[in-house]
Image (cartoon, rainbow, N blue to C red):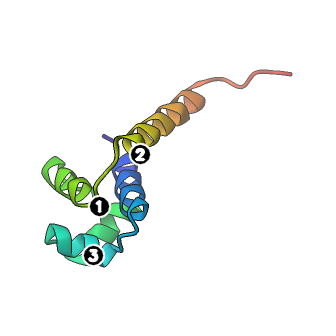
Amino acid sequence: MAMNQAAELIGTARADIGMSTGELAREVGLPVGMIEAYEDGSAAPTRYLLTAVLTAARLRPAIALAVLAAGSERRQHIGSSPTSA
């Protein structure tokens, strides 16, 4: 998973349930600065930590699917050549 997708998943899942970064950090047992770094993409969580963070943020499948689909759509758009009108 790309780091920007992990960041988007964490931030979107947390916001979806109205949880602050501090609350999420306490739930997972990490410093709030780590959650902030994961969300802004300046640090990448390990798969284990990503799973723990997303579980604590109660990630809904619909959010994961939307984030992954948006990432796929962006990659397809970047890879396509512009068409003339």
The secondary element bearing badge 3 is classed as: helix
Work out how far the residue at label 1 is from the one at label 2, CA to CA, in angstroms.
21 Å
Give, as a three-letter code, the residue at label 1.
Answer: Ala
> What number is the disc on residue 43?
1
Q: Residue at x 29, y 61 (%)?
A: 43
Q: Residue at x 37, y 42 (%)?
A: 64
Q: Earlier in the sequence, mark 1 or mark 2?
A: 1
Q: Earlier in the sequence, mark 1 or mark 3?
A: 3
> What number is the disc on residue 63?
2
Give, as a three-letter code, the residue at label 2.
Answer: Ile
The residue that label 3 is drawn on is 23
Compared across the picture, whether 72 is left or right of 7 comes to right
Which of the 4 image quarters holds residue 55?
bottom left
Work out how far the residue at label 3 is from the one at label 2, CA to CA, in angstroms.
20 Å
| Residue 42 appears in the picture as rendered | no
Q: Earlier in the sequence, mark 3 or mark 2?
A: 3
The secondary element bearing badge 1 is classed as: loop
- Residue 5's x, y, as percent? 38, 47
> What number is the disc on residue 85?
none
- Residue 20's x, y, as percent? 36, 74
Q: Residue at x 26, y 70 (%)?
A: 24
